[in-house]
Amino acid sequence: AQSVTQLGSHVSVSEGALVLLRCNYSSSVPPYLFWYVQYPNQGLQLLLKYTSAATLVKGINGFEAEFKKSETSFHLTKPSAHMSDAAEYFCAVSGGSGNTGKLIFGQGTTLQVKP
Amino acid sequence: EAQVTQNPRYLITVTGKKLTVTCSQNMNHEYMSWYRQDPGLGLRQIYYSMNVEVTDKGDVPEGYKVSRKEKRNFPLILESPSPNQTSLYFCASSSQRGSSYNEQFFGPGTRLTVL
């Protein structure tokens, strides 16, 4: 069965500092991996996705993530945090081609950005 | 504009009073899904539909019903709501083809309170 673990339910960084949000997954098939962001009172918006092409994936708003099969990780990073990055972030996994299309989500990480 | 819409956005109701939350997408997506979001649990899938007249249970289907009579619509029905169904609900859709495979687009959410 597939699963996702996000390490740290809350992460706090200073404006301009590196953002690192951790995600580890478990999957018995080659996974598709996603990072979504949820701003207050809004739905989820896709930040980036990994679908077995390049292992370093660049997304919107300066975020990127690296797929590391040996570590079963897909950590999200951004070199310099902005106040507008404060939101909740979700990592998700799906089973790739042939599966039911279901996404398994992690518990979410709330990012706080301090001035 | 490509989007997933949900109605209502906010709903307060009482135990046992049947309700329907509507979901509609204008992207001609085959796949649609309902999730509920609860603090510390991330998003959990309630039901999904691979196409018209094809629906199946997700991880937490108890107390919910769905139907898919048209490709664009996927209503969520609570026949007899209970307080443990108080939650934030999201509808999502995705294409099952091409480079957008499994990239789910989310509606704005429906915050339901059952008293």
Image (spheres, helix red, strand yellow):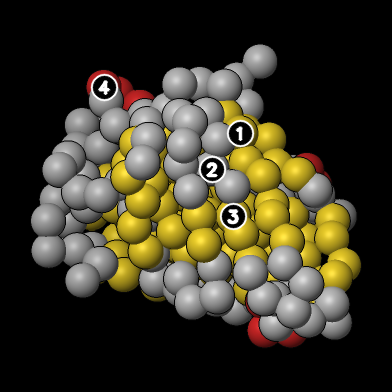
Secondary structure of the residue carrying tag 2 is loop
Residue B68 x, y percent position in the rendering: 46, 41
Secondary structure of the residue carrying tag 4 is helix
Chain ID at mark 4: B
Whether tag 4 and tag 1 are in contact, CB under 8 A, the answer is no
10 Å neighbourhood of mark 4: few (<14), some, or many (≥20)?
A: few
Name which quarter of the figure residue A29 lies in: bottom left
- In the image, residue A23 sits, relative to residue A86, either above or below, namely below
Labels 1 and 3 within one chain: yes
Q: Would residue A73 appear left or right of B87 to someone viewing this image?
A: left
Whether tag 3 and tag 2 are in contact, CB under 8 A, the answer is yes
- Label 2 is placed on what type of residue? Phe
Residue A92 x, y percent position in the rendering: 41, 56
Q: Give the Cα separation between the discs numbered 4 and 2.
A: 23 Å
Report the residue marked by disc 4: B98
- Label 4 is placed on what type of residue? Gly
Q: Give the Cα separation between the discs numbered 3 and 2.
A: 7 Å
Q: Quadrant of the N terminus of chain A?
A: bottom left
Asked if one can make out residue B110 in the rendered structure from this viewpoint, the answer is yes
Report the residue marked by disc 2: B74
Name which quarter of the figure residue A112 lies in: bottom right
